[in-house]
Image: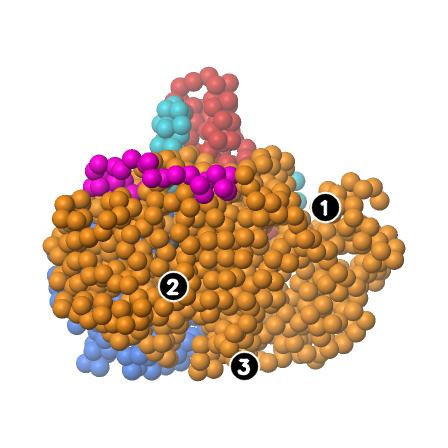
Chain colours: A orange, B red, C cyan, D blue
Amino acid sequence: MEPRVWREMGLNDEEYDRIVEIMGRKPNFVEVGIFSVMWSEHCCYKNSKPILRLFPTEGPAVLQGPGENAGIMDIGDGQAVVFKIESHNHPSAIEPYQGAATGVGGIIRDVFTMGARPIACLDSLRFGELDNERTKHLVRGVVAGIAGYGNAIGIPTVAGETYFHSSYQGNPLVNAMCVGLINHDEIAKGIASGEGNPVMVVGAKTGRDGIHGATFASVELSEESEEKRSATQVGDPFMEKLLLEACLELIKTGTVVGIQDMGAAGFTSSACEMASRGDSGMELELSLVPRREEGMTPYEIMLSESQERMLVVPKAGYEDQVKEIFTKWGLEAVVVGRVTADGMMRLKENGEVVAEISAKALTDKAPVYHKEDREPLYYQEKKNTDLSHIKQKEDSNAVLKKLIASPNIASKEWIYRQYDHQVGANTVVLPGSDAAVVRVRGTKKGIAMTTDCNSRYVYLDPYKGGALAVAEAARNLVCSGAKPLGVTDCLNFGNPEKPEIFWQFKQACLGVADACRALGTPVTGGNVSLYNETTGEAVLPTPTIGMVGVVEDLAYRTTQEFKGVGDEIIVVGGLAGSLAGSEYLAVCHAMEAGNISAVDLTYEKKVQEFTLEQIKAGKVRSAHDCAEGGLAVAVAESCVGSGLGAKLELNCDERVDALLFGEAPTRIILSVPAGKGAEIVDAAKLQGVHAWQVGYVFGNSLDVFVNGTQEITLAVDELKTAWKATLPNHLD
Amino acid sequence: MLSARVFVTLKKSILDPQGSTIQRALKSMGYPEVDEVRQGKLFELKLGDMEREKAVQLVEEMCTKLLVNPVIEQYTFELLED
Amino acid sequence: MLSARVFVTLKKSILDPQGSTIQRALKSMGYPEVDEVRQGKLFELKLGDMEREKAVQLVEEMCTKLLVNPVIEQYTFELLED
Amino acid sequence: MKFGVVVFPGSNCDADCYHAVKDLGHAVEYIWHKDTDLKGSDCIIIPGGFSYGDYLRSGAIARFSPVMDKVIEFANQGGYVIGICNGFQILLECGLLPGAMLRNNHLKFRCADSLLKIENADTPFSNLLEKGQVIQVPVAHGEGNYYIDSEGLKTLEETGRIVFRYSTSDGEITQDANPNGSVHNIAGIVNEAGNVLGMMPHPERCVDELLGGTDGKLIFQSIVARFERG
Ligand SMILES: Nc1ncnc2c1ncn2[C@@H]1O[C@H](COP(=O)(O)OP(=O)(O)O)[C@@H](O)[C@H]1O
Ligand SMILES: [Mg+2]
């Protein structure tokens, strides 16, 4: 076999030699294909594994950590929450609608594979500059694709985030997260065991979709990926809805040994992973696999990424029961092989062996690379940029209007209004607040969820930025009245073969790990997406943090908008922000630089615990995390949500723009009933938490005084119009 | 007056869930004769008065630029006098 | 092997938001020549071997029963040998 | 009184409807689309969702499910039938209600609260409401742009068969209040006999303060009230 064969499949020569060594012979074409997908970053994390080990993955509530299709955490009453996030960046860059749609379909399968009923989806999106035509095309397509799949299958898309930055121009990020509910005694796993048990393919027929999609997803996006367009898969939400119902019905019967969806690398990865987890082998007869197209080769069948398919291993003798359930839902279920005891993946076509590889070799013997990391040149330079000479903007009114209308801060209603965020009739806090909350039927509980990452911070300081993303996610949950529970992460970075990129990756993960440890939110799973580059330019390092939490009693769920005139406004945590890495600096001074503030994790935890305590005590009417745009924007967001104005008096010797628009971690804006402010501030002091009573909800305009002089006066209607108009103006 | 009819269909290798669902429906309604259904789009464009060459080139352009998604779709078109 | 191509379009009396959106888009892209765009559906049905008469009648039936909603849509079709 | 919720492949508001009436304390059962027995239901709910993926046209394929013959029979005998969202589309496709659904005029799926003006409070589905009253019920659809020819529209208007219209909070019928371009802002209509209702908004999504409203209850309770009065 010529070297170009394995090279084209994405294997390097050392990896090929390693295969020969493991097998004790030269692999044939099919076998090389199988190794190439199993040993791609996407499937075996060969570049990221050593770093991922940094994450804390244990905790009293963790029922399932990394390694399965999704993580599981206990929420009491014999119930648990199942959640996972996944990227579909490159497919979305090439075909935004189908790329995003199949991304949603894939992550939903990961959750119901575990036996859980999906209760919500989230989407974390990043695109290039909004005024660019290509960006508009991508936004329209991606949003329509997420809506098209999520709405049709009937799972509400309740939250997410959307950022615009030139670095994502050619390589948008589309991260989809799914959250499900399960009873402890109904957890299913992706395990194949029990010699002689049947292996069944269920769901859609196999076609030539997305062959090599997995390796494709791990190769830098370039001109020729235009050619790999055959890799485009089309989603069928209707088929997946049937598959979802059929699988949950099947798992409830208790006759399932193992079940796993066919995601990236299709049949190959699900079969090998299931066998490997069960310390078993499999013998498969490929001619039995139902196909959509004629003349498919074993290679194509093994590597096809046709959607809406699952691999099921039931107890021997229950094949007909499986068929019965799937037939009821109008789906196929076909026995294609058996579990064996010899640990070999043995693939046959019409009785003749076409591939024979040890399952463990494909999973556990995959190469692991300890990549070199090097601090990039820009780091110190950006960090040491002196911002003190930045000229203050005279007109704070103008600045606030500009910021509130800037694409990163402007209302995302244009997006989430296209998502059915209420189907299921359990969405208690809809998109538009810090975190969404979904009711757990039959209990007083709710599940709060959010995705967060300010990738500008991560770029300027990967370690601090990684920690900040975790802290913000937790803060968003706390603001909605939830106790943060656990994390699923989607690590979107550039080409790890570049030491500077790998440094970003490593530092960011260290930050994420330390924050997760400090805040008691273990990582239960995630996804790594590397090679997010176009023609050599990497995206901003983007470790998206998906986090879930529990609202013990929905009676004290909280949202970000002000509730009533006269309520007193309190800033908890810290008052002034910094210009470093702020949206203000980027939007008003066209600069992305500075030494961003680090999050003091011990203090962060204190502030969050204090806030949650006050919320639980029923003392808080609104709570809002102070993020992009700083104090003024956060208060403005609480105004536009309710139409109520506010009067603020800030006394501080910070420069005015830093005070109003500067950014810093660990800041929360509360509103509390009239007369209760002082009480809260005192309570905070007792716990070593700083708090300032800065004003009250009043009238229909936002008026802010700094050290006695009025800096801002804007009608809430005017703010609201500016805030809402940006996306429609660009996208309609 | 020239007008064009553009026929856009999914490439052969691309899955057509809509078409196959319709095929299954027809089957269950008693039309087993139908082995396969593929659904596509049809665009009718009024072009006003112009030479056919111009029209052909124009339609080609509009197809590649807007009407057709080359990643998953293919197209043909015809010109009509009316 | 017979196959049929069914063309389904909205009745003239019914306005077609998709079509007019495309028309506006084409205009803004520099194709003012296009006065009107109507979007319709195209179905390709594989019918296997049968006489044309049978096929014609079959397709008529499938159109009126399922493929077309007479309240808003009209249709034409053609048969192809292949 | 007993409700029956029909479940088609691709239905996804079936459970929401089931719980909505159950939480109101009424008997309710699911009815699989292949069943040909309505299980003694006094009111049939055709729920929202994407039956058969909404492929071809919303509701076009579902109408051929075996259960629909029974539903039509039941309706023709005066039984109460309420079709919500995709259920409305199915009732249109099977001819129990006149007209058809077009794609939303803005071509996008729209999930948002909508305000509905009660145009006819003398139906089995609205008798606990007041004519002219405005209620808040969420919509979530991509094809809710109701169309009917001018003749049919005239009849609907003249015979009071328009039950709900999209309106402003003070009952004005404006374009801005219309989420989908529906003719005359029509959100819900009944058949000639008045026992079959189709509506695009989702009453089952607002039957609990937790979900942000309870106006939807009034519609289900109206059915019960009328049923019990006989
Ligand atoms: N792509 C999206 N899908 C769904 N909801 C979104 C999306 N983008 C933003 N949102 C919602 O808009 C609101 C504001 O988003 P964001 O500014 O990220 O909030 P925060 O800064 O509090 O994290 C949140 O409720 C978020 O869930
Ligand atoms: Mg955020």
Q: Position of residue A689 (x, y in %)?
A: 30, 66
Same subunit, labels 1 and 2: the answer reads: yes
Label 2 CB, ligand 1: below 8 Å? no
Between marks 3 and 2 in the image, the one whose residue lies nearer the viewer: 2
Between A635 and A158, the one lying in front of the other is A635
- C-beta proximity under 8 Å, tags 1 and 2: no
Was residue A384 drawn as part of the magenta stretch in this picture?
yes
- Where on the picture, by quarter, is residue A56? bottom right
| Subunit bearing disc 1 | A
- As rendered, which of A654 and D222 lies closer to the eye? A654
Label 1: how many Cα within 10 Å (few below 14, some 14–19, many 20+): some
Can see residue B68? yes
Q: Which residues are magenta?
A: A378-406
Q: Is residue A250 left or right of residue D23?
A: right
Q: Residue at x 16, y 53 (%)?
A: A649
Q: Confirm whether residue A531 shows in the render.
A: no
Give the quarter of the image for residue A281. bottom right
Name which residue lies at 24% across and 78% down: D224
Q: Please report the residue visible at 42 percent of the width from the left and 50 percent of the height from the top.
A: A454
User: Alpha-carbon distance for marks 3 and 1?
Assistant: 42 Å
Earlier residue among tags 3 and 2: 3
Q: Earlier in the sequence, mark 3 or mark 1?
A: 1
Image quarter where the C terminus of chain A lies is: top left
Query: Which chain does the residue under circle 3 lie in?
Result: A
Q: Secondary structure at mark 2?
A: helix
| Residue A683 at x, y percent in the picture | 25, 72
Which of A393 and A127 lies nearest the eye of the viewer?
A393
The residue where tag 1 is placed is A9
On residue A185, the disc is 3
Q: Give the residue number, with chain letter if any, for mark 2.
A: A604
Residues flagged by tags 3 and 2 on a common chain: yes
